[in-house]
Amino acid sequence: MATVYRKTVTRPLPEGAELLTRKGRQLARWRDRKGERRTGTVIEGRDGTLRVSVESATYIAKYRDGSGVVREVSTGCRSKDAALAVLRDLVERAEKVRAGVVTAADDVVRDWLPTPITKSISDYTSELRDRGRSVKHIADCQRLTSRVFDDCSMILLRDVTAGPVERWLRDRSVEGLAPRTRNSYLQAVRGFCRWCVEKGRLLADPTRSIAKVNESCDRRRRRRSMLPVELQRLIYVTTWRPLAERGRLTVAKPRTERRGKRDTWTLAPLTLADLPAAVERARERLADRPQTIAKLERRGRGRALTYKALVLTGLRRSELASLTVADAILDAEPPRLVLDAANAKNGEAAELPLRTDLADDLRTWLGGLLATKSAKTGSDKMVRLPAIGMPAVLTPQTPLFVVPPQLIKIFDADLAVAGIAKQDDRGRTLDVHALRHSFGSLLSAGGVSPRTAQAAMRHSSIDLTMNVYTDPRVLDVAGALNVLPALPLEGSPYKPHPCEATGSYDRGQTASTANPNVVHSVAPTVAPNSGNWGKPEALADNSPPRSPQPRNEKTPRNAGVSRGSSERRRAESNRRCRICNPMP
């Protein structure tokens, strides 16, 4: 059954081919790219054009595989002897599968090992696209894996081994690569290898033995959260800075910084104190261009609304940029934003409730957007905005927020004008993603339960919410110390309360009803009295009566009754303090 042969294929008639007839057959004669003379039979194609029938340049191997299926595989050999050697190898593999020496899956993997890595990477990214992964995630996976394989000189799939990849990661760490970036490279390569295992292209993940490094030991960027007063200052500066830039004063340049005869002045730096005056100067300079003033004011308001939405929703910059007008449901109760699964980092769709003031700002913003853009009508691809109160429509693809690509540069300029340090005394920095950190920290500082904060942050782990996205400096740690007892170093010593002598003093009482040195406690409201465990004081003794004991018992018949009566009288006397709460 096993054999090798050259397959007959048809190709378009080469240019300049000479047509001739021999023994009743029409032939074509031409020279190939190497200058050799070739001859083939001329046939008519399905479309009526002339084509030439020739044999393939390489041999085809035909055999029966281990499952009993007839296969035709290209050997890639121009020589028949080499093609027969390939055929013998294929037949031997089929016999091992039939004998149970090798599994069918191992045999399939062997066919993928000599294929180029680039083909598998292309198939991998195509499947990620079909799964609905974000464009950024797909681009990062392709970029990271391609760089590792290119630097390690891995061309074929069988070249992927753990040793070169681990050495490459170690060398990059020595060069100063951050641990988190190193782990990103490893995660991208490992994800590709695991996909190859799932698809039967590799037997096992060769990178499973490579361990990740601890990112907490050398974190290059530690973000901090912004305080409420800093956020208010940032919003104020962002709103008016685009207009204030047109009202900056000019100052003379030092002679050492001048580059030419005309380079004698520069714009003075803009500060928070000079911001109102700069806005007024800009209005005076642009008095004859009201459209420019309105454009600058709208630009500042759009950026401020972007910052506010990042702080009050916890969205990431890319997630906020993906929102469109169709994703804003402002006429519902409560108003909310709809985030598609394809645009979310965790790949899960979410509905984010909006606070009332943010929803009102969005309505105002969309109203201005309707006034500045020409709205199309009469199409079913429009989204009506009844919450705005305007009989107009917007296309659903209209971006909801203004998120420029270089938002980090704008953010840094706003921080500088607001007088907010980019880096604090702990080495923690501020960037656009720090606004999400501020969202998590302010939730914890406001008394929101950790589980609720985790749901609002859309985190899979409570540890990530509490330890990474919660800044201790934002929390009122100093105020929490006020619940500790007062310990004066001077003054009269502690005087015991009269009730303590009788054993009826409740240490959970407040300072107004007990000793003023005792701090308020919530224990009495949630726990039973320590002196009478399991039996509240207000409840009567409803225990069943004791049965009489037999007369021949060694213990006197009235001993248990008298002992119980005395204990009951002593407990009743301790429940009510005669000094603090006398009988009426």
Image (cartoon, rainbow, N blue to C red):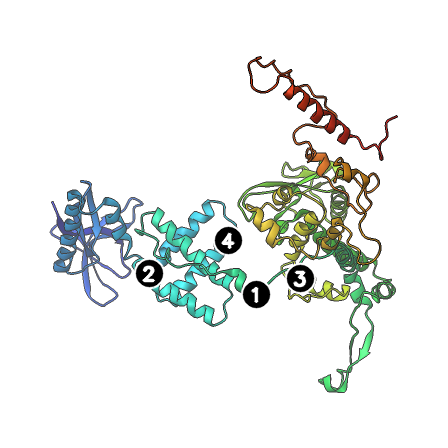
Measuring 81% from the left and 33% from the top, which residue is drawn there? 577
Distance between mark 1 and mark 2 Cα atoms: 29 Å
**Res. 161 mark:** 2
Other-residue count near label 3 (Cα within 10 Å), few / some / many at <14 / 14–19 / ≥20: many
Q: Which secondary structure, mark 2?
A: loop
Asked if residue 525 is positioned above or below residue 206 in the image, the reply reads above
Image coordinates of residue 165 in percent, x first then y, are 38, 63
Name the N-terminal-most of marks 2 and 4: 4
The crowding category of the residue bearing disc 2, from other C-alpha atoms within 10 Å (few below 14, some 14 to 19, many at least 20), is some
Q: Amino acid at mark 2?
A: Thr
- Of circles 3 and 4, the one toward us is 3
Give the class, few, some or many, for how many residues have Cα within 10 Å of label 1's Cα (few <14, many ≥20).
Answer: some
Disc nearer the start of the sequence (4/1): 4
Q: Inspect the image, locate mark 4, and give the three-letter code of the amino acid beneath it.
A: His
Q: What mark, if any, has residue 430 been given in the picture?
A: 3
Residue hosting label 1: 220
Amino acid identity at mark 1: Arg
Label drawn at residue 82: none
Residues under labels 3 and 4: Cα distance? 24 Å
Residue that label 4 marks = 137
Q: Foreground: 100 or 562?
A: 562
- In the picture provided, is 199 more to the left or to the right than 572? left
In this picture, residue 347 sits left or right of residue 29: right
**Quarter of the image where one finds residue 378:** top right
